[in-house]
């Protein structure tokens, strides 16, 4: 009996030691080489399962967050903007056109002349048609974002991406949303959907089910052109983390789930975010869609599910895990598409930041270091070069979406 007890005790001790080593390895990996941590976690999932790995990741992320909090409490680290901040706030969004002059009315009787001009005879003046105003386009800007912290330049939109004509079609800003974690800074990119188009690509491996249809993981050649391809960013969870629906060009990698959040892309370039079966369903003009858990923002308000950690709502993505997160949102007029990304985030912090930026409908995308990824695409001659939104944290495999990708992703092109 004693020998069995000792064997059991040593067995339990061995399991605890193994778990501690795994957590330590994940901690080091996510802090130094996020790609190793990401691929290592995927390997562990095949051995001990999704939920067990999620719990181990939660411990590693919490340990890292505790270390960061201590460093800031001791004054050994300070909050910092992820890039040089704008010095002035962008002007509020304006109507599409503004008139430059007032059209004379018949009651005014006469058309005014410039000083020094020779008046025309009355008969000629009467015969001349009244001048009409020519509408002058007003450059698009995102609606003002509400600052949440104390960093200089927070919430100020900076021109970020221009098309060949020189027109700015994307701005960026940052938000400092968490008073408990001043080192948490969210990067926000806003796209003008009247001059850009959102596309979705199924990965060569994910999302999928065993023996199910898969994508190519590549951007079509017609869009991989200098001046056309503007940006790329990550997709959603792996299939096993919720089995949320995904479709590209008629290939359904995973069927849609009623009531879950979805971003939908149409043939005419329209983008909508909502819930499948509640305004968004499969139609002939729907070319791609991607689900990812529940809506975070509905009609400009944070949804109740944001406060829960239910696997039924979030798959393997527990909202209380402090980690890198990303999200996608739309403005009330569906003209502005927002991408969000940032470290040390929990769901109840990410969601209000999305509302502060102007999101009317929004959903979460992928999470964790390495998988959260955004780059603009620069042209050097005929060569495409990826430039990360967070240069230090997104430098690993920064051109991953310019090659065949195992994971799904989105990309942005200029409208011809």
Image: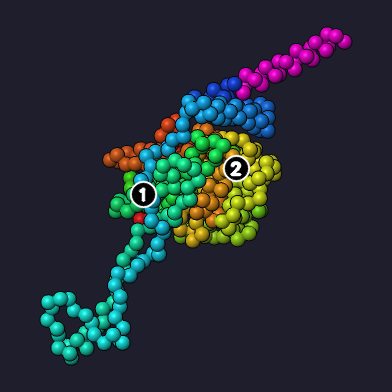
Looking at the rendering, the stretch of residues picked out in magenta corresponds to 1-23
Q: Looking at the rendering, in which quadrant would you find the C terminus?
A: bottom left
In the image, which is nearer the foreground, mark 1 or mark 2?
A: 1
Q: Give the x, y percent position of residue 252.
A: 58, 48
| Residue 72: numbered disc | none
Q: Residue at x 41, y 48 (%)?
A: 156
Q: Give the x, y percent position of residue 247.
A: 56, 49
Q: CA distance from mark 1 to mark 2?
A: 30 Å
Up the image or down, 277 lies above or below 346; here it is below
Quadrant in the picture for residue 101: bottom left
Q: Nearer the viewer, residue 323 or 223?
A: 323
| Residue 88: numbered disc | 1
Instruction: Name the residue that disc number 2 marks.
Output: 347
Q: Residue at x 68, y 33 (%)?
A: 51
Magenta segment main secondary structure: helix
Q: Nearer the viewer, residue 308 or 113?
A: 113
Dot 2 falls on a residue whose secondary structure is: helix
| Identity of the residue furthest to the top in this view | 3
Q: Which is more N-terminal, label 2 or label 1?
A: 1
Does residue 218 appear anywhere in the picture?
Answer: no
Up the image or down, 225 lies above or below 134; here it is above
Q: Nearer the viewer, residue 119 or 152?
A: 152
Dot 1 falls on a residue whose secondary structure is: loop
Q: Nearer the viewer, residue 313 or 50?
A: 313
């Amino acid at each position: 009996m004693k020998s069995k007890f000792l064997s059991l005790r040593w067995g339990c001790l061995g399991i605890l030691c193994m778990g501690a080593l795994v957590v330590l390895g994940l901690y080091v990996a996510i802090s130094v080489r996020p790609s190793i941590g990401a691929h290592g976690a995927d390997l562990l999932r095949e051995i001990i399962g999704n939920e067990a790995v999620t719990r181990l990741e939660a411990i590693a992320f919490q340990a890292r967050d505790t270390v960061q909090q201590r460093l800031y409490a001791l004054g050994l680290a300070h909050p910092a903007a992820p890039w040089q901040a704008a010095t002035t706030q962008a002007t509020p969004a304006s109507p599409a056109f503004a008139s430059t002059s007032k059209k004379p009315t018949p009651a005014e009787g006469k058309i005014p002349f410039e000083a020094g001009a020779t008046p025309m005879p009355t008969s000629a003046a009467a015969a001349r048609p009244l001048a009409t105003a020519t509408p002058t386009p007003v450059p698009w800007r995102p609606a003002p974002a509400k600052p949440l912290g104390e960093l200089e330049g927070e919430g100020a939109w900076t021109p970020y991406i221009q098309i060949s004509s020189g027109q700015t079609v994307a701005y960026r800003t940052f938000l400092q949303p968490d008073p408990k974690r001043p080192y948490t800074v969210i990067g926000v990119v806003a796209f003008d959907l009247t001059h850009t188009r959102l596309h979705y690509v199924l990965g060569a491996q994910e999302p999928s089910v065993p023996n199910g249809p898969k994508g190519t993981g590549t951007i079509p050649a017609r869009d991989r052109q200098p001046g056309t391809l503007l940006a790329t960013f990550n997709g959603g969870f792996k299939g096993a983390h919720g089995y949320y629906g995904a479709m590209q060009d008629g290939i359904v990698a995973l069927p849609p789930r009623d009531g879950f959040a979805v971003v939908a892309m149409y043939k005419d370039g329209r983008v909508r975010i909502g819930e499948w079966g509640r305004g968004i369903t499969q139609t002939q003009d729907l070319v791609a869609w991607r689900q990812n858990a529940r809506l975070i923002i509905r009609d400009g308000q944070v949804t109740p599910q944001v406060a829960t950690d239910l696997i039924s709502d979030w798959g393997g993505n527990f909202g209380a895990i402090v980690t890198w997160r990303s999200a996608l949102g739309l403005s009330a007029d569906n003209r502005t598409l927002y991408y969000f990304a940032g470290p040390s985030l929990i769901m109840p912090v990410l969601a209000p930041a999305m509302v502060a930026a102007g999101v009317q409908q929004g959903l979460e995308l992928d999470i964790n270091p390495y998988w959260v990824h955004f780059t603009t695409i620069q042209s050097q001659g005929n060569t495409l070069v990826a430039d990360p939104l967070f240069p230090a944290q997104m430098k690993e495999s920064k051109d991953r979406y310019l090659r065949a990708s195992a994971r799904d992703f989105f990309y942005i092109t200029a409208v011809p």
